Amino acid sequence: MSSPPSNRPRWSGLSTRAIHLNYDPASEQGALTPPVFMTSTYAFETAEDGAALFRGEKEGYVYGRTKNPTQALLEARLADLEGAEAGLAVASGMAAISATLWTLLSAGDLVVIDHTLYGNSYALFTRGLTRFGIRVEVADFTDLDDIARALALRPALIHFETPANPNLRIVDIAAVSALAHAAGALVMVDNTFATPVLQRPIEHGADLVVHSATKFLGGHGDLIAGVLVGPKAILDRVRAHGLRYLTGATVAPLTAFLLLRGLKTLELRVERHSASAAAIAELLAAHPAVRRVGYPGLADSPGHAIAKRQMSGFGGLVSCELEGGLEAGVRFMNRLVLATRAVSLGDAETLVQHPASMTHAAYSAEERARHGIGDGLIRLSIGLENLPDIREDILQALDAVTVKRTGPARPSP
Ligand code: 4LM
């Protein structure tokens, strides 16, 4: 694949860079769309060349488990969008997190995590790493005193999500990063819910950013992939160890191509997801059947002031608890017609799921209760359908579960 065309300016617009960065059609016979390199291995000109590539004395492609030109273009664009030095694309979000942890941590090290994470991320830390002698401390990252307590234990790394899955809690990236750096810890942030369109954690002091690219980055519910971006020295190590032999979790060239395509419309899509989600959050907050709404864009939500500082919009996810609790929540989900009952998020389709029994089932019931993931919590990923249709679907399902008032009917005027 071509190197950055030297005669082009460095565009400032996020979509412009997502569409054009590091590719010049002239270098590929005029092809508008970058070719997909469907190859597993690469020819060495001479045996000596091959040996030099293996020793790392020569730059180039060797074998598709660690690098492919389609993947390299994707990685350059992802790093650029997040304001990072380097990027790495892998087979899933879980692969991005695990390849990083297996590379950076050793037995005896301590990691501090926020208590509200995607269920399998939480399981990887608390049930997976701990089997190999890595210690894990859970803290409340919205409470700086609790973080200070955990940082006094001298972790090698801290990890959190903001907005967090599933309840959209907001963590102050700048404040937490400053405390962690003072304690000598690396800061890793899962930016899946916000995407670089709305939030770039490295600008606020984070060292490493991971994504489930399965979600908004891909955007069409047709791929599984993950991303890590950060300093080149760390990314080189994760590629050479975490990807090459600790996980072998390579992204397929065709998946890298679909992600490059997804990035071209990322900004457009995220803006639409966010605008519709904000409207749905308002609608839910005003509805008598709804007890609580989780959406950082609501002026009275606990993380609103921090979210306004570190995000340029509030994203496409909304959570809520109904007055009738779990039972009403299940009836509400089953009544939806347009919205699809499914896990995952960031797709064109509006999706609805029940975290306690689905994405966060890896937490014990006691952990969920302690960590603010209520049994009645419902998570909506607001899609790209027209807002009046999404609205109508949600309203009809809410009306079906609204407890009808008993007593005499109001006299007609
Ligand atoms: C879901 N989430 O919530 P892969 N980080 C975050 C996530 O939400 C996820 C991953 C990592 C959901 C999947 C079913 C914040 C996943 C893991 O699924 O391995 O690409 O990403 O619905």
Image (spheres, rainbow, N blue to C red):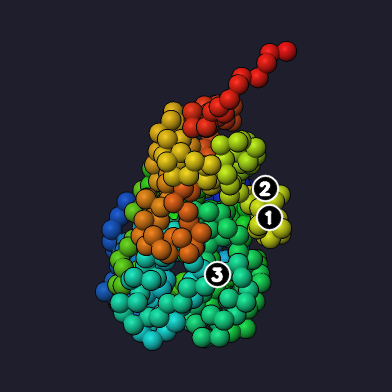
Quadrant in which the C terminus appears: top right
Task: Please report the residue visible at 62 percent of the width from the left and 77 percent of the height from the top.
Answer: 145
Which label belongs to residue 298? 2
Q: Nearer the viewer, residue 403 or 391?
A: 403
> Which residue is tagged 1?
304
Residue 26 appears in the figure: no
Q: Quadrant of residue 310?
A: bottom right
Closer to the chain start, of discs 1 and 3, is 3
Three-letter residue code for mark 2: Leu
Three-letter residue code for mark 1: His
Circles 1, 3 touching at the beta carbon (< 8 Å): no
Which label belongs to residue 140? 3
Residue 29 spot, x, y in % from top left: 46, 45
Give the CA separation, mark 2 to mark 1: 7 Å
Circles 2, 1 touching at the beta carbon (< 8 Å): yes
Closer to the chain start, of discs 2 and 1, is 2
Give the CA separation, mark 1 to mark 3: 17 Å
